[in-house]
Image (cartoon, helix red, strand yellow):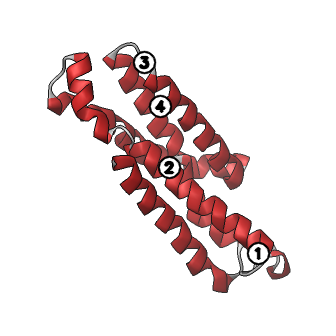
Amino acid sequence: MENDDLIQIGTAEYKRLATAMVMAGFATFSLLYSVQPLLPEFSTTFGISPENSSLAVSLATGPMAIGILAAGWLSDRIGRRTLMIYSLISAALFGTMAAIAPTWESLLLLRCLSGIALAGVPAVAMTYIAEEVEPATIGPAMGLYIAGSAFGGMIGRL
């Protein structure tokens, strides 16, 4: 992209990008940690120990960390924006299916798939910002993504 084509702060394009990045960060980490308040309920409902109930969080965060390695490669093939969109849609679908999972094992499988799907956002969000906005605007735009991520992680845990 030429510098003339880069998004500048204060424009409508920047406001859309900033809103999208805040919401992408928020959605990623709220989906990732949304089961944390449910861990005691999982123990009761599925008859498992509290330690085992924590797998609902771990089996999403671990695969997400591993998925980040492949997501960068995939974003070079299909595009960063496309990958982030499909990642969030897939994770939301897996999360919805996990809410009605009939067994502990099926819930864990869906949490694992959700973690893999979510990897597409943190893997490429900052690169996407760096490629789309003018250099002086990169810092504030990345700050908004990080703020959305932190807020999403906090809200997900509540």
Q: Dot 4: what SS?
A: helix
Residue flagged by tag 1: what amino acid is it?
A: Ile
**Dot in front, 3 or 4:** 3
Q: Nearer the viewer, residue 133 or 21?
A: 21
**Dot in front, 4 or 2:** 2
Q: Give the percent coordinates (x, y) of residue 144.
A: 55, 70
Residue at numbered disc 3 = 101
Q: Dot 3: what SS?
A: loop
Name which of mark 2 and mark 3 comes first in the sequence.
2
Name which of mark 1 and mark 4 comes first in the sequence.
1
Question: Taking 125 as reference, is 34 left or right?
Answer: left
Q: CA distance from mark 1 to mark 2?
A: 24 Å
Q: Quadrant of residue 5?
A: bottom right
Residue flagged by tag 3: what amino acid is it?
A: Ala
**On residue 113, which mark appears?**
4
| Residue in the picture at 18% in, 21% down | 48
Residue at numbered disc 1 = 7
| Residue contact at pointers 1 and 4, CB within 8 angstroms | no
| Residue in the picture at 41% in, 32% down | 112
